[in-house]
Image (cartoon, rainbow, N blue to C red):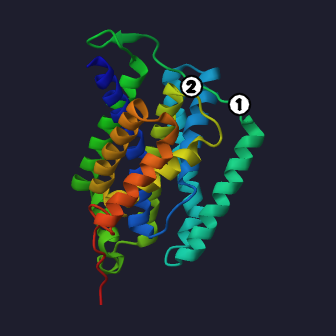
Amino acid sequence: MSDLLLTLLVGVMQAGLYALVGLGLTLTFGVTHILNFAHGEFVTVGAFALVTLAAALSTPVAVPLALLITVLVAALVYLVGFRFTIGNHLQGLAFSLGLMLFTENLFVEMFSTTPRTGPRIEGTFALFGGEQVAWSRVLVIVVSALIVVAVAVLLKRSWVGLALRACGEDRFAAATLGLSAKRVGLYAFVVAGLLAGIAGMCIASVSPVTPLTGADYLLTGFVVAIIGGLGSAEGVLVASLMLGLVEALSARYIDPSLTSVYAFGLMVVVLLVAPQGLFNRKEVRAG
């Protein structure tokens, strides 16, 4: 029983990380209609900013600074690049791929491929039956859940959320109401950078990170975004929980070396049943 509980906790933790990455992807896609292949690099920036700053400063100071750096990087990337590609999907795709390759190689040159770990809460507690669970994993679950709830409230109750949803539903109609797609795109990238930065810091607190960590989570982020339905925040949450639990249970009771197979297998099964994803939002265009 305790073994199953531990496996479920690991699955929920992974689901939280997938949700943070997938939400950022689906928010930026919903507004700009561009698949941002460089989104995983925001995760890497957050992770390495925390690892680097925590080595020189206290953790309470390093965390907000690392988050600020990630958000500023995301905003800068949008302002100097993606802002000019809205409406040109191919150009945006090419820019994101080039940025991903450039950033990965830059991080390899700066930090090498040696795994690094960030600050973490030491200690464990015992489940029923004696299985030990690290407090750092529990913290990741709590933080992920709180951030997901905060984003849900932001999207439903704030003017920023209203602007993001309006441009995602129909940016032409939104423009007639005075909402600039390029300005709202900046909001989307800032929120996406915030989510990716938090994901990167959470990852660094529970496992070693390398310059390729962001690319690994980018792949999974795309999987949950596609399963849930591109542009659907609710779909990302459901798909993240499904994938996290499937991976954890399969890795524990079947074969841990086939994690990617489980992820893509789940995606194929879902797309066979629902080709547009579980919660695909039909795009409406004015005129």
Indicate the quadrant containing the C terminus: top left, top right, bottom left or bottom right: bottom left
Point out which mark residue 114 bears. Answer: 1
Q: Residue furthest right?
A: 109
Whole-number angstrom distance, CA of label 2 to CA of label 1:
13 Å
Q: Quadrant of residue 210?
A: top right
Residue at which label 2 appears: 118
Q: Is residue 82 left or right of residue 162?
A: right
Q: Is residue 158 above or below residue 63?
A: below
Q: Measuring 39% from the left and 17% from the top, which residue is drawn there?
A: 135
Q: Is residue 229 visible?
A: no
Q: Is residue 156 visible?
A: yes
In the drawing, what numbered circle is on residue 137?
A: none
What residue type is disc 1 on?
Answer: Thr
- The location of residue 24, given as percent across then percent down, is 42, 53
Pointer 1: residues within 10 angstroms few (<14), some, or many (20+)? Answer: few
Question: Where's the N terminus, which quadrant?
Answer: top left
Q: Residues within 10 Å of mark 2 (few under 14, many from 20)?
A: many
Which residue: 65% across, 41% down?
Answer: 211
Q: At numbered mark 1, what does the secondary structure look like: helix, strand or loop?
A: loop
Image location of residue 260, percent across then percent down = 49, 46
Residue located at (68% from left, 56% from top) = 101
Identify residue type, mark 2. Answer: Gly
Q: Position of residue 85 (x, y in %)?
A: 55, 73
Tag 2's secondary structure? loop
Residues tagged 2 and 1 counted as in contact (Cβ below 8 A): no
- Left or right: 9 with respect to 100? left
Q: Is residue 94 left or right of residue 180?
A: right
Quarter location, residue 214:
top right
